[in-house]
Amino acid sequence: MANDTRTTAEAKYAKTQARAREAAQAMSEAEAESRRVNSNTARLRALRLARDAQAAKDQVAAAEAKAAAKATGKAKPRAKAKGKSTAGAKSIPVEKLNAANDE
C-alpha cells in the first residue's frame, strides 16, 4: 500500500513538472511571438513615417516649383474651358465696334 501511494505521488509530481515545463514553453513562445509582432510593427511604422516624410518633401518641392514658375512668368498654360465654343463668334477690332455690329 505504501508503494502504491508512493507511485501515485510520483506520477502526480511528474504530471505537475510536465505541466510546468509546458507552461514555461508556452510563455516562451508567446513572448517570442510578441517580440516578432512588435518588431514588425516598428518596421512598418518606420516605413510609413519615411513614406509620409518623402510625400511631404515632394509636396513642398512642388509648391516651391510652382511659386518659382509663377514668379518668373513661366506658369503652365491654362486648359481651354470646356463647353465654350468660339467657332461661330466673329472677331471685330475695337476701333470698328459700334451698335450696328451687334447681331
Image (cartoon, rainbow, N blue to C red):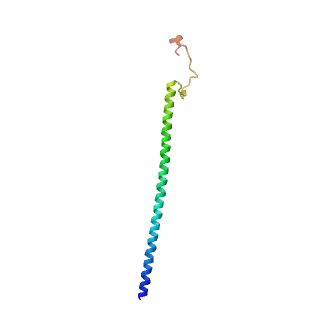
Q: Position of residue 51 (x, y in %)?
A: 50, 44
Q: Choose top left, top right, bottom left or bottom right for residue 23.
A: bottom left
- The picture places residue 95, in percent across and down from the top left corner, at 53, 10
Residue furthest toward the right?
87
Q: Name the residue nearer the viewer: 41 or 21.
A: 21
59 versus 80 height, above or below: below
As drawn, 81 above or below 37: above
Q: What residue is drawn where x is 51% and y is 31%?
A: 65
> Quick check: 87 left or right of 8?
right
**Residue at horizontal 46 percent and vertical 70 percent from the top:** 22
Residue furthest bottom in the image: 1
Q: Provide residue 24's location: percent of width, then percent of height.
A: 45, 68
The N terminus, quarter of image: bottom left
- Which residue shows up at 45% across the image and 61% down it? 31
Q: Position of residue 82 (x, y in %)?
A: 54, 29
Q: Residue at x 48, y 54 (%)?
A: 39
How many discs mark residues in the rendered view? 0
